[in-house]
Image (tube, coloured by chain):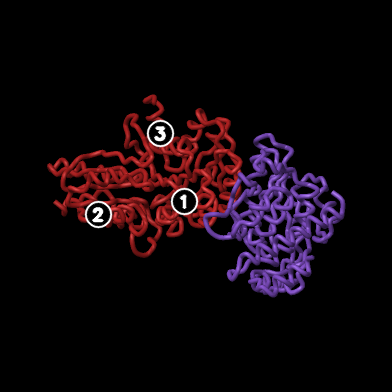
Amino acid sequence: MKQSRISSFDGADSRKIIGKVLAEIHKTHPNINVLYADVGKRFALENFREAGGFTLDTGIAEQSMLGVAAGMQSEGLPTIAISYAPFLTGRAFDQIRANIGDMHLPLILIGSPSGFSAGGLGPLSICLDDIALMRTIPGLQIISPADGLETYKAILAALESDKATYIRMTGKILDAIYKEDYPFEIGKAVRFRKGNKIAVIATGAIIAEVLSAVDRLQVEGKSVSVWNMHTVKPIDTDALNQCLDCSYIVTVEEHNVCGGLGSAVAEYLAGLKAHPKLIRLGFSGEYPKADHYQNLLERSGISAEKLYQTLSRLF
Amino acid sequence: MNQKQMESFSKGMRRDIVELVYRAGSEGAHLGGSLSLVDILTVLYCEFLRYDPRKPDWEGRDRVVLSKAHASIGLYAAMHMAGLLSDTEISLPLYGDETFLYKHSERNIAHGIEMSGGSLGQGLPFALGIALALWKKGNSESRIYAILGDGECNEGSVWEAAALAGHLKQTNLTVIIDKNGLQLDGATEEIINMDNMEERWKVFGFDAITVDGHSYEDLSKAFAKISDRPKAVIAQTLKGGGVSFAENNVDWHDNVLTDMLYKQAKEEIG
């Protein structure tokens, strides 16, 4: 891929990146159809429309949107349904059960903002349970991209996989984690750093905070492995096996520690005779009150500073 | 098809329905809402639907989306009478891996079953998606019929999709409401009174008409009407029609046919 295209995804808003990425994907996949529930402006979908893509605003009606998208997909038209993550996955959960879980229609769902991204709007806009819900849907792939380039690659790979996929967008401004092109494969984690004692496994934009904390430790001569588990389902068990010689595995996610990446890793480790101690970092407890994104990361212990403190204590 | 042939189609359907409900055994099945569909499906399959029994997934087919999928037994009976299911297939069990005829239909395009049912309120959005897709594919011949129950219209997702279909003026879509007046807990008007059903669909942008759901002529006229809007045919029906003990009897939404009742039902249908 051209370096100019890679840089064009750098620093984008985690919602507006979608319109930009879809416009790019339209060049190679002109038949894709995009449905959305009154979020066209938020996702800058005019970029996709101006590129010649088919869009339909189904109104503020996520349940109906899922059904309409499924009906289109059932006729062989590749269809992407987009909305705010909590309403897409929560309100329309039963439609996802029927259309994807049961009928296995290869829809692509894009939910944004997820995690703490919409923290300023309050607890019902903060999305901390979508991975938990989506993991129960048979056959549904779950990808949480780390940056703009990975978002492009994830949607493209999902389309080409011909399997239903939930793309979960976290973070606010997506600074490039990947500075140059790299091979992306669904279900195959990417290692960023190497260390022997601790392996951090993270998903989504939070990887930026993880890298910041780990690079600080590196300056102190303490090495930590970092894995970008961009695909939460199917989880990359080969990558997990490579972490088994560590003393600690630390999962980091903008999600409830119940049901998300940490749970998926715990479920795998629980089936082994022996495994490193697992520390699951993320959200737990009562829904948080409205606050700035960084403050919410701080309070959940997953800001760069808090991660640095937690990881330091493990050495 | 003449009146006599259509009556024979309806009678064959009722026989199949009773056989299938009896085969459901002690778990019972939805006799009432399957029987209320008989004449509607007779008119559709005998007079209107484009289908090919040799190729049920033919692209040029009309699509039937049974949203009130608890009445799937009624759909199978119609498909059998229309030649879309063989005598062997209609004799399949209703449970397990060796069948594809479940009490709530499972999507099976090879047999022309468009959607998995069992969760009410999902058929109209799905049918609207098909309708849009056919327009996009340049298929202007095929029509989409979404069959809903009147109780099902309690579901909000029905009205989300109705609003969108009306807004889009989706003229290749016909909604059929099987208005048998009963739902699981009792009379629909006592649970949520939606008695002005025709007006409701009109307000949402549909060309709506109320007909006698057991009159071939009324149904036929309603289905034939050309409109510049999506259509809603509100078919007033008798739940359990044709089997006396089930007629307009809320207990027969879903119930068990004992040997004695099975015998009686068969005798009444003839």
| Residue occupying image coordinates x 39% and y 45% | A144
Badge 1 or badge 3: first in the primary sequence: 3
Secondary structure under the numbered disc 3 in the rendered image: loop
| CA distance for labels 3 and 2 | 40 Å
User: Which residue carries the number 1 mark?
Assistant: A85
The amino acid at mark 3 is Phe
Q: Chain of mark 1?
A: A
Give above or below for A24 relative to A265.
above
Q: Which mark is residue A272?
A: 2
Marker count (numbered): 3
- Please indicate whether residue B184 sits to the left or right of residue B232 in the image: left
Task: Provide the chain ID for the residue under circle 3.
Answer: A
Q: Mark 2 or mark 3, which is nearer the start of the sequence?
A: 3
The CA span between labels 1 and 3 is 21 Å
How far from the left and from the top, in percent, is residue A178? Answer: 32, 34
Q: Is residue A126 visible?
A: no
Q: Report x, y in % for residue A212.
A: 25, 43
Q: Which image quarter is the N terminus of chain A in? A: top left
Q: Can you tell which quarter of the image residue B56 is in?
A: top right
Instruction: Please name the residue shown 23% across and 44% down the image.
Output: A242
Q: Amino acid at mark 2?
A: Leu
On whether disc 3 and disc 2 are found on a single subunit, the reply is: yes
Dot 2 falls on a residue whose secondary structure is loop
Image coordinates of residue A274 in percent, x first then y, are 20, 55
Q: Quadrant of residue B178?
A: bottom right
Q: Colour of chain B?
A: purple
Q: Is the residue under label 1 in contact with that under label 2 (CB below 8 Å)?
A: no
Ranked by sequence position, the earlier of labels 2 and 1 is 1
Foreground: A38 or B37?
A: B37
Position of residue A287 measured from the top left corner of the image (x, y, whole percent): 39, 62
